[in-house]
Image (cartoon, grey):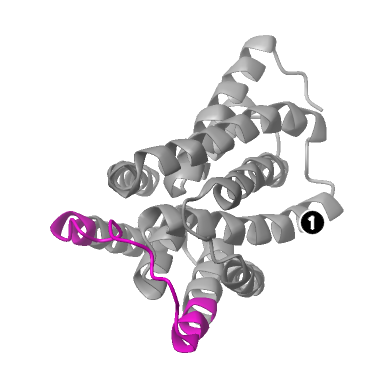
Amino acid sequence: MPDISLTTVLFLCGAALLAGWIDAVVGGGGLLLLPALLLGVPHVPAPQVLGTNKAVAIVGTTGAAVTYVRRAPVRVPVRTAVRVGLAALAGSMGGAFFASGISNEVLRPVIMVVLLGVAAFVMLRPSFGTGEAAGAVTRARIVTAVVLVGGGIGFYDGLFGPGTGTFLVLALTAVLHLDLVTASATAKIVNVCTNAGALVMFAYQGNVLWQLAAVMAVFNLAGGMLGARTALRRGAEFVRGVLLVVVFSLVAKLAFDQWY
């Protein structure tokens, strides 16, 4: 555990709280949490920062997932979410295997174009994800969700990472015909699976600052549970607005990383 000032700990706890809220509503909390850790503990090796980030995030994600399942006005497809999550876990391991051969300078512009396309689609289709969640989902759609959403986005998460939660929400809405709130709930269960796999690997390698993670996790859990309740109370239109803010923030961050 590095020597960290009280001011830095308070800053990191505040970031964990807000990141948990954002992640529960629409995904993308890592856009805040990971940079905050890099800023707060700049001398800590990158693997330990990543491992600590996962140890914090999995607590908030789990709290949000439980809150969604218990309080959602419609049934959250838990079994489907677990299937997609297991595929995402396998996909993320494959993505991590190939990550060393991919240039971020090439990948970032591609992701930015995709995100801007997503933002345009959401803005031009105001009804997207605002209707009632589908009662029954066909077997073909479930298979598509497992293979493309789980395997594909899981692979992206292992390969690159930023915005995975947001991509999950959008993809689950489109493939399974869920409303945005139910898609956010389903995405949290998938995220628990992927975070668990990554955390096991980081812990095995000794790359987790457990004391710092434990303190931050309390605030991330509070933010995650509060965010889930906010999304359930405010509905799909609110989630849609937060989604657009997160998408444009992600594009701005990727652009900054690419050219500055």
Front-most of residues 196 and 211: 196
- Would residue 115 appear left or right of 26 to someone viewing this image? left
Q: Residue 152 colored magenta?
A: no
Q: Residues within 10 Å of mark 1 (few under 14, many from 20)?
A: some
Front-most of residues 167 and 108: 167
Query: Looking at the image, which residue sits at the far top?
Result: 6
Q: Please determine whether, in this image, residue 186 is positioned above or below residue 98.
A: above
Q: Position of residue 184 (x, y in %)?
A: 46, 54
The part of the chain drawn in magenta is: 120-146
- Is residue 260 visible to the viewer in this orientation of the structure? no
- Quadrant for the N terminus in the image: top right
Residue at 67 percent across and 47 percent down: it is: 58
Q: Residue 133 colored magenta?
A: yes
- Would residue 128 appear left or right of 212 to someone viewing this image? left
Front-most of residues 54 and 75: 75
The residue identified by callout 1 is: 200
Residue at 63 percent across and 48 percent down: it is: 66
Residue type at the position of mark 1? Val
Give the number of callouts: 1
Q: Position of residue 106 (x, y in %)?
A: 38, 64
Query: Looking at the image, which residue sits at the far left?
Result: 124
Q: Position of residue 193 (x, y in %)?
A: 67, 61
Q: Please determine whether, in this image, residue 53 is positioned above or below residue 105.
A: above
Q: Position of residue 194 (x, y in %)?
A: 64, 61
Mark 1 lies on a secondary structure that is helix
